[in-house]
Each structure stands twice: as C-alpha cells, then as structure tokens.
Amino acid sequence: MTIKIINKSAHALPHYETEASAGMDLRANLETPVILEPMERAIIKTGLFIELPIGYEAQVRPRSGLAAKKGITVLNAPGTVDADYRGEIGVILVNLSNETFTIENGERIAQLVIAKHERAQWQKVEELSSTDRGAGGFGSTGVK
C-alpha cells in the first residue's frame, strides 16, 4: 500500500523497524523541549501530514518501552487519524508517573499502525439474540 505523506519535520519518515513490525515510530517535532509534569498532558506535533485511502485509518498507539519505563502514554489510545483528515498528526501524551519527563525534538513518542476498517449500518430491532454471557461485562467472566 502506498500512502501520500508530507514531512515538515527534519526527521526521517516513519518506517518499520523490523520485517514483522505492525507499527512505525512517530517522532516529536519540537522547536524547544516540552516538559510534562506528573499527570500533565500535551499535544505533541510530528510535522507529518498524510492522505489515507478511504476504508483505512492510522492508529496512534503508545510505545511500550516509554510507558513501562517512564509512565508516558498516549491518552486517547488508540488515537485515530481518519482518511479525510489533512491536518498535522499530533499525539496526546500524558505523564502517569510521579516524575517530570522532558520530550526532546526527534524523540520517538508513539507508534502509527495503518488498519483497514469497516463501516457499519444500524439495524433497529426490539431485542437481541441470547447468549450464555448475556449482559455480563466488566470482569463478569472472572479473573482466573
């Protein structure tokens, strides 16, 4: 698949790090570092603009290492870039740690996964089919 992209950053285009990678790293495009205090959030721009084919989305997801080691994650994970969006890709980062975190220009802050999606049509009905699970949710099937 080929996707049109404009790169207004000084960084290389996102790319797959390994043959089996699902996501490509997004880098911060900053004039000055951004400091995130504990529990603070900020939109970090990437300098990237894309044109996706209809029927696809770009999912902005956290980087596992950044989340596990520093407590930094994508707040609305996964964030969605729709096929008709033409603005700059921004990443909503949040600091869930107890320590200040500094985001530097060029730092890998999230990953981008391109995914095909379906469009649903609603069919109004008076009742749904029954299942063994029924309306059970939020841990109703147990934890072990």
Image (cartoon, rainbow, N blue to C red):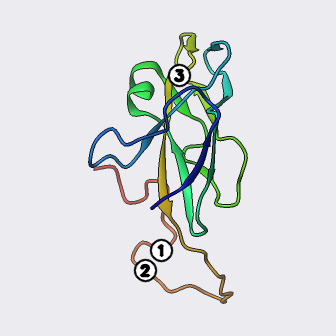
Residue, x 61% and y 77% (percent of image)?
Answer: 120
Write down the residue under mark 3. 106
In this view, the residue in front, 8 or 84, is 8
Kind of residue at disc 3: Gly
Spatial distance from mark 1 to mark 3, Cα to Cα? 48 Å
Residue, x 47% and y 74% (percent of image)?
Answer: 134
Numbered disc total? 3
Left or right: where does residue 132 sit relative to residue 32? left
State the SS at label 3.
Answer: loop
Q: Which quadrant of the structure image shows residue 63?
A: top left
> Cβ–Cβ below 8 Å for labels 2 and 1?
yes
Spatial distance from mark 2 to mark 3, Cα to Cα? 50 Å
Which residue of the protein is positioned furthest toward the top in this rendering? Answer: 100
State the SS at label 2.
Answer: loop
Write down the residue under mark 2. 131
Write down the residue under mark 1. 134
Q: Residues within 10 Å of mark 1 (few under 14, many from 20)?
A: few
**Residue 4 vertical placement versus 63 (above, below):** below
Q: Position of residue 62 (x, y in %)?
A: 48, 37
Left or right: where does residue 23 sit relative to residue 73? left
Residue, x 44% and y 25% (percent of image)?
Answer: 66
Spatial distance from mark 2 to mark 1, Cα to Cα? 5 Å
> Closer to the N terminus: mark 1 or mark 3?
3
Q: Position of residue 36 (x, y in %)?
A: 63, 16
